[in-house]
């Protein structure tokens, strides 16, 4: 049972990392509080569902398609977000709240309120005696870790990554140093959009899709970002796995319905503990 | 504001008010419109309550918590104790006020986006509890069969709030009128100036002798109590209370949308927003687009933020 809990935690935690990574890159670079993050993930999930259902696209092919579509959508949204006025953080939060409502209702209109699930690709694999790992979980772990490593390498090893980290740390100084901040905003939204596009089909395959299911994912992304700080990948991984462990444990001992309380409770506790929210950060570059 | 435009807006308000008062006497689809506008009055009251907090400079995304708690308090008392409507409504207000007190104290150091986020999360706690405490709240099935409001007579006139939609219409209108007086006070009275001072500059307000914490606490508790009362009324009017219904994101979004659309700094602004948008949504958009009509609320938020000259501040 303990091994099963561990496997579930790792797969859930990897997925949470993916969810939080997109949010934290967008937030860290552009200060856009994308409250519609979860809704966009669910939208991407529905897109993948539609592709597999109506055009019988293999699951592996839906991933690049969804990533491409969500990247384009994110770049379109950036153009709208840029028009918002000060205070930008709060304005973007309220704007994204409106966006979340619009997306929810569009999904309700096109896909109705029924629960949908992308069909699984095969029977679960038996590891040892009573421990099973489903193919979804393998997809989830493999792709999430790959994406996280890719983003991590990009941030740490490339010149572009260096520029992005500079913008995350100190926008104005980065601008003075000759970094084109507007350009970095576009790149952050593109990367964030791609990560959203990747997370959607994985969500649709391992859980049920429902038009109002996005807010939970958003809360999870916010909790983990708040815990770790924007763009700190090791912190994100740790936070995600910790949250997944807490949620798996709660599901195991109290039942799956109480799970939703965990992220909301942690979010409130974190906010009371760090009332300045996400923006108050004084960190050295080495931490990123 | 210059005198001519002021007198014109007063004339406009008188016309709108008279139309609303006289509508049940014979208008277009009287029963339907009265039903819809009655609920518009209810949500306008919630909007006024929401704006009390917003006037102190905090955007709340969690008024569904107060609304749902009020609805559940009323419905549970009605079901388990069989209490009369005045008792259940008072309990609804008190329950929500207690939660408002907790929110105001716990989130006293949060501002702007952090506050919005914390209130958004604060809805989840009562929601999940109502959703899962099967023996007490009947879980996600919700409470059905809450008794309607009682009939009583005022000055020789029979006011049957239980079944007569016109009576409900006037009852809710009276509630809204009281809320409007409260709202006007929150803008124009000494307390209103304290709220404004806290909103504009907390430190300066504190220097001038305004107790920032107490002002916000008062506004939040009052707002929560009024919202809870509306939740209780909702439970009695609808006769059913479900977690997914009363703790819905839309209940939190509605006051924000209405207040932004109508204007937050006039006493009639939130009411205007609620009447126009809720009326348009329910009377025209809902029949035409049954699933997904509520996208209009999100769309209004986005458009207002993009095109209003001062964005959130207007």
Image (spheres, coloured by chain):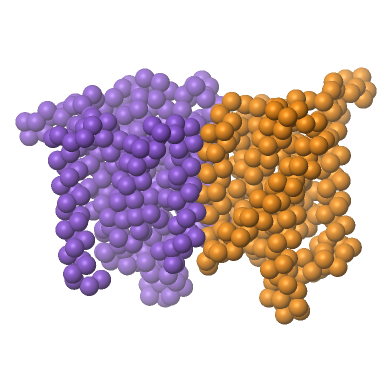
Classify residue A259 by image quadrant.
top right
Classify A226 as above or below B2: above
Classify residue B235 by image quadrant.
top left
- The residue furthest right is A128
Classify A164 as above or below A115: below
- B263 to the left or right of A259: left
Front residue of B2 and A90: B2
Where does residue B117 sit, x and y in percent of width and height? 56, 51
Q: Colour of chain B?
A: purple
Where does residue A126 sit, x and y in percent of width and height? 90, 22
- The residue furthest front is A55
Quadrant position of the N terminus of chain A in the picture: top right
Q: Is residue A24 visible?
A: no
Where does residue A284 sit, x and y in percent of width and height? 79, 69
Where does residue B249 sit, x and y in percent of width and height? 50, 41
Image point (59%, 50%), residue name: A35
Front residue of B179 and A79: A79
- A56 to the left or right of B81: right
Quadrant position of the C terminus of chain A in the picture: bottom right
Classify B11 as above or below A2: below
- Total label count? 0
Front residue of B17 and B66: B17
Image point (76%, 78%), residue name: A178
Q: Is residue A202 visible?
A: yes
Q: Colour of chain A?
A: orange
Image point (48%, 42%), residue name: B295
Image point (64%, 47%), residue name: A37
- The residue furthest bottom is A176
């Amino acid at each position: 049972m303990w091994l099963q809990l561990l496997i579930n935690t790792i797969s859930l935690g990897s997925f949470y990392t993916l969810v939080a990574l997109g949010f934290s890159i967008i937030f860290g670079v552009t200060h856009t509080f994308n409250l519609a993050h979860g809704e966009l993930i669910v939208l991407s999930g529905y897109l993948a569902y539609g592709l597999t259902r109506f055009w019988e696209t293999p699951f592996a092919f839906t991933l690049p398609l969804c990533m491409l579509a969500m990247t384009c959508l994110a770049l379109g949204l950036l153009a709208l977000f840029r028009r918002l006025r000060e205070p930008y953080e709060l304005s973007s939060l309220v704007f994204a709240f409106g966006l979340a409502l619009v997306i929810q209702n569009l999904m309700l209109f096109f896909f109705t309120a029924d629960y949908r699930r992308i069909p699984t690709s095969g029977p679960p694999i038996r590891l040892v005696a009573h421990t099973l790992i489903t193919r979804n979980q393998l997809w989830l772990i493999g792709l999430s870790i790959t994406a996280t490593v890719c983003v991590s390498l990009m941030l740490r090893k490339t010149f572009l990554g260096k520029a992005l980290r500079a913008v995350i740390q100190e926008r104005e100084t980065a601008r003075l140093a000759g970094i084109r901040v507007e350009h970095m905003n576009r790149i952050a939204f593109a990367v964030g959009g791609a990560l959203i596009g990747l997370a959607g089909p994985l969500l649709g395959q391992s859980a049920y899709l429902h038009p109002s299911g996005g807010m939970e994912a958003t809360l999870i992304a916010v909790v983990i970002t708040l815990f770790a700080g924007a763009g700190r990948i090791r912190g994100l991984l740790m936070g995600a796995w910790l949250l997944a462990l807490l949620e798996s444990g709660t599901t195991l001992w109290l039942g799956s319905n109480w799970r939703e309380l965990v992220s909301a409770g942690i979010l409130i506790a974190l906010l009371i503990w760090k009332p300045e929210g996400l923006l108050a950060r004084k960190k050295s570059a080495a931490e990123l | 504001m210059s005198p001519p435009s002021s007198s014109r807006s007063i004339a406009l308000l008188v016309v709108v008010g008279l139309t609303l008062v006289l509508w049940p006497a014979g208008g277009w689809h009287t029963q339907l419109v009265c039903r819809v506008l009655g609920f518009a009055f209810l949500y306008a009251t919630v909007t006024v309550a929401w704006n009390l907090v917003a006037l102190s400079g905090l955007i709340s995304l969690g008024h569904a918590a107060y609304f749902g708690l009020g609805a559940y308090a009323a419905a549970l008392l009605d079901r388990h104790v069989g209490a009369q409507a005045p008792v259940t409504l008072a309990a609804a207000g008190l329950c929500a006020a207690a939660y408002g007190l907790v929110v105001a104290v716990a989130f006293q150091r949060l501002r702007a986006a952090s506050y919005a986020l914390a209130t958004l999360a604060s809805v989840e706690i009562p929601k999940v509890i109502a959703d899962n405490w099967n023996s007490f709240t009947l879980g996600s099935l919700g409470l059905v069969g809450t008794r309607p409001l009682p009939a009583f007579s005022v000055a020789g006139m029979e006011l049957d709030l239980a079944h007569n939609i016109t009576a409900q219409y006037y009852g809710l209108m009276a509630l809204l009128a009281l809320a409007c007086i409260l709202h006007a006070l929150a803008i124009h009275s000494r307390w209103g100036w304290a709220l404004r001072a806290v909103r504009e500059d907390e430190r300066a307000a504190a220097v001038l002798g305004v107790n920032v914490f107490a002002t916000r606490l008062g506004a939040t508790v009052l707002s929560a109590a009024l919202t809870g009362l509306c939740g209780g009324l909702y439970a009695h009017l609808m006769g059913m209370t479900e977690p997914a219904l009363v703790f819905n994101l839309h209940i939190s979004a509605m006051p924000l949308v209405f207040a932004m659309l109508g204007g937050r700094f006039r006493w009639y602004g939130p009411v205007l927003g609620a009447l126009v948008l809720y009326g348009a949504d329910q009377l025209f958009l809902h029949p035409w687009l049954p699933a997904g009509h509520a996208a209009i609320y999100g769309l209004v938020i986005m458009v207002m933020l993009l095109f209003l000259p001062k964005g959130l501040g207007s």
